[in-house]
Amino acid sequence: MQVNQGILANLKCDLPAGIVVFLVSIPMSLGIALASGAPLFSGLLTGIIGGLMVAPLSGSQLAISGTAAGLSVLVFAAITELGFNGFLLALVIAGLVQILLGLMKAGVIAHYFPSSVINGMLSGIGMILFLKQIPHALGYDRDYEGDFSFFQADHFSSFSELTNAVEFISPTATFIAFISLGVLILWEQPFIKAMRYARLYQGILLALLLGVLSNQYLLMFAPELALKDSHLVMIPVFSTFSDVLAQFHSPDFALFDQPKVYLAAVTLALVASLETLICVEAVDKLDTYRRVTSTNRELMTQGLANTVLGLCGGLPVTQVIVRSSINIQAGAKTKTAGFIQGVLMLLAVLLIPEWMNYIPLATLASVLLVVSYKLINPAMFKTMYQAGWYHFIPFCVTILGLVFTDLLIGILIGLVVALFAILLENYKSASYFREAVIGNKIIFRLSEHVSFLNKANIKRTLDHVPAYSDVVIDATRSKYIDYDVFEIIEGFKKEAALKKINLTLENMRGFGVLKPIEKARSQTYDSQQALTPACVLEILKDGNAHFINNLEANRNLLEQVNDTQQGQFPLAIILSCMDSRTSVELIFDLGLGDVFSARVAGNVVNDDILGSMEYACKLAGSKLIVVLGHTHCGAIKGACADVQLDHLTGLLAKIQPAIAAVGNASVEKVAEKNVQLTVEQIRARSSVLETMIQAGDIGIIGGMYDVETGRVAFFNPSW
């Protein structure tokens, strides 16, 4: 699903969303400026720059940038220590640090934030916002909009403030909040959304308009009941343009050599970047079009904006999740909504501040109550619970951390707990696949990246391997092995010898970034001719060892298709039973073009098979003939039971010499003897093959495959 990114293409969605965000941004910007100990205009300036500058340059289509509640404590401390102009110098430097972080590709850290923390942050902010808006909905407006701290400056907490608000309840504010909330809830109903006219404008705008008109009606006909002063939005009103210019401040460059300025700058840069990156992940998660924001571009954009704000007297800008969520829920499609929000803030400050001051905070509270409920998202609790405790606990802790501290500390608590959960999960769940094959055989297949985090788990597992076990450690897939893990495996090699453990290390080729494993290629004429029968036998033995250890050579079968399209140069021809359990390519870990495979029930020989062998060895260059029987062979059992069945009768008759040779011995002894006699028949009936054997050009050998263990036992070679 894609969306047209044109400015005008989505204006019908972006314009109302921009208006809604603008109306919410005004009181939040003012409140955070107040909490930061900065001029109120500086908060508005940050919102304006966030819309006019950050929105067009940002890679995020839906995020809103502005003043951040999480930075208010840091800003307040910096202003107290450096003065406002000294703080602005620190903000300029902080912006340059963010630009540098973006150039260094530090934005990649955003991809390492656990989803449990991101989801917890969204739900936690929703809970905080819900708790904080209840007093405003009741008309208790002593706390500023955007206060996300649990413990407040008036010594109340988010919970005690609820009971305190009841004592100062305003019937008018409660009524306005109630009717606004009713409109918002009604607008969410399917039958309203289905109406054509309801799609033309947002329910949020209707609720805000209804709240303003209700209060204006009371001012006209019952002024004693109307909301005034602190119960309304309060934008500073400037008489002249000179008054506006007087609100701009410049940094104090005289403090350029002060270490405390740089300490404040680095702190602001790191915290602002962290908040922005977390918000980037959260907004991308909320985006229904699943667009992905470039985090490095975002850092550079935010850094540039902070440098500009430091030069003209603003507060730090970051992506802010509350306003971004409102933007998304208001139906925004592109970054045009964020730009519109900035334009409207500028116009409101310059042209119509008196009009903006008609908006009741109770109406805004009703909007934020609906937004906060959607952010809480009760269904997410069930989803995270189903994901397991290692996700559910960090999710819950992040929520509790946000609710009982503040935005920044809550996120940090969530990240710490999530990291601990990751370590614990990594310790308890394997970083490799453990597979018991038969009896006491254990196989460990290491993953692509075996890091220090896997150390404790691997050590614990290897320490519990019992004596006399058959152990395989397969590093074929590994591209990186941490030195600590490599050291543990090297130590286990010594321990294995003491505990009589049969240890097989497959492609364990060091530590750190590992060299790629060469792919097994099909044979060429030169490689085939360079081999002797003994070399081919060793290749088959090694392949069978791979098979019984659940290993396989690193080969690309499609690549081998290309290698063999012009010709074939197999190593051997293998005569085996047609039994479905005896595929020689699997048993010997072979690829395309490696062997000729002749299969017939009971691995008996006839003229057609002899002709095939003569072709394989004399004309195609194969170096070895293998006659492969197997245990629990149905054909051998049928011959021993003297089964009579049309054409099968003649085939089983070829096994009778083996039965006669061993007498009343077991079926397995008959199968072994049948292999030996077949080898003798091949040599006796084909002068071509016998001559090549005598000359040492080829070899011939028999063997038995055990269907219970997968192991092939070869007889003495005939060369």
Image (cartoon, rainbow, N blue to C red):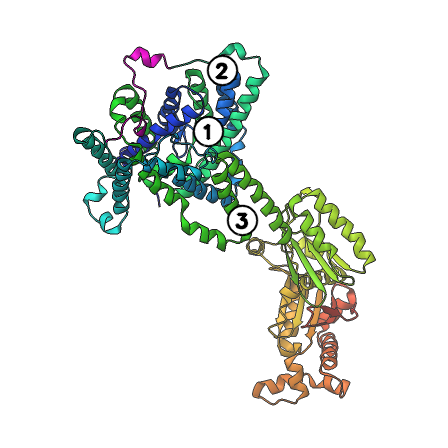
Residue 569 position (above or below residue 448):
below
The secondary structure that most of the magenta stretch takes on is: loop
Near mark 2 (Cα within 10 A), the count class, few <14, some 14-19 or many ≥20, is: some
Location of mark 3 (residue): 393
Is residue 507 visible from the viewing direction of this image? no
Q: Say which of 609 and 506 sits in front.
A: 506
Q: Say which of 433 and 94 sits in front.
A: 94
Q: Label 3's element?
A: helix
Q: Counting residues from the N terminus, which is met first, the one under dot 1 or under dot 2?
A: 2
Place of residue 100 in the rendered image (x, y in percent of width and height, measured from the top left): 53, 25
Residue 296 position (above or below residue 655):
above
Q: Nearer the viewer, mark 3 or mark 1?
A: 1
Give left or right: position of 676 versus 94. Answer: right
Which span is picked out in magenta? 226-247
Residue 254 position (above or below residue 710):
above
Q: Label 2's element?
A: helix
Near mark 3 (Cα within 10 A), the count class, few <14, some 14-19 or many ≥20, is: many
Q: Counting residues from the N terminus, which is met first, the one under dot 3 or under dot 2?
A: 2
Location of mark 2 (residue): 83
Asked whether the beta carbons under mark 3 and mark 1 sit within 8 Å of each other, the answer is no
Residue 611: image quadrant is bottom right
Q: Which mark is residue 153?
A: 1
How far, Cα to Cα, is label 3 from label 2? Answer: 42 Å
Give the residue type at disc 1.
Ala
Give the residue type at disc 3.
Ile
Q: Say which of 170 and 538 sits in front.
A: 170
Near mark 1 (Cα within 10 A), the count class, few <14, some 14-19 or many ≥20, is: few
Q: Counting residues from the N terminus, which is met first, the one under dot 3 or under dot 1?
A: 1
How far, Cα to Cα, is label 3 from label 1? Answer: 31 Å
How far, Cα to Cα, is label 1 from label 2? Answer: 21 Å
Place of residue 490 in the rendered image (x, y in percent of width and height, measured from the top left): 76, 49
